[in-house]
Image (cartoon, grey):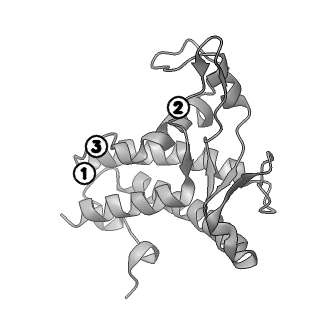
Amino acid sequence: MVTGINAQISFWGQLTRPESHTLEQLWSGLCYLYRIVKNLEQTRVEQDPMAKDFMGTNFDADCGSGDPMLLNYFLWYSCSADSFLDLFSIAFATKKNPKLFRNMRNFRDNVGAHVIHANPNRKRRRNDNRQARSVALCQHVAWHFGRYAVGHLRIGDPGTGEFSPDDWGWALTEVHEALYSYISERLAK
């Protein structure tokens, strides 16, 4: 029996729900992206066991992983996970926006799906200032204590009091593991 994050969640057993097909497709894609990033993290830690104890960045798309698509995995994951969470909340009558995924969704809203710089007057924009727009344009992947993460870059201008948001930072594998637990708990009910 497979347990933990490697156990398979399937929505095909929920075929009485019209959302089953789309949930299955989105979940499969999220799992695929998770496995890619998890393998990159494991490889980095195997190459340098001390890597779990520090933070760092290369200011490039791959953060030393050797995979130039790494930043894209975060962009794709945030957009798909946002859609998945919305649909899951409808299908299973759960809380629509649990705080557990707030940073990932904020990143998605301001970087992954609707780059704040391209549409600064869009409704629901918080912290829409020059610093936030600048950070949205220069996202990069960082190494954050054993995980690849995005959204942790903070810049500010003490003269104007404008700072980039502090609620965009998230690690794909950490969010996926939390999402797995969140879904498992709700499906078990």
Q: Quadrant of residue 20?
A: bottom left
Judging depth in this view, the residue of 62 and 123 nearest the camera is 62
Mark 1 in CB contact with mark 3 (< 8 angstroms): yes
Write the residue at 35% across / 63% down.
Answer: 181
**What's the CA distance linking mark 2 and mark 3?**
20 Å
Q: Give coordinates of residue 125: x percent, y percent.
A: 50, 19
Q: Is residue 27 left or right of residue 39?
A: left
Q: Is residue 18 left or right of residue 80?
A: left
Who comes first in sequence, dot 2 or dot 3? 3
The three-letter code of the residue at mark 3 reads Ile
Which numbered circle lies on residue 92? 1
Q: Give the crowd class for mark 1: few <14, some 14-19, many >=20 residues within 10 Å.
A: some
Which element is circle 3 on?
helix
Which numbered circle lies on residue 109? 2
Above or below 154: residue 24: below
**What's the CA distance linking mark 1 and mark 3?**
6 Å
Q: Residue furthest front?
A: 158
Which residue is label 3 attached to?
A: 90
Q: Give the crowd class for mark 2: few <14, some 14-19, many >=20 residues within 10 Å.
A: some
Judging depth in this view, the residue of 20 and 42 nearest the camera is 42
Write the residue at 73% across / 74% down.
Answer: 48
The three-letter code of the residue at mark 1 reads Phe
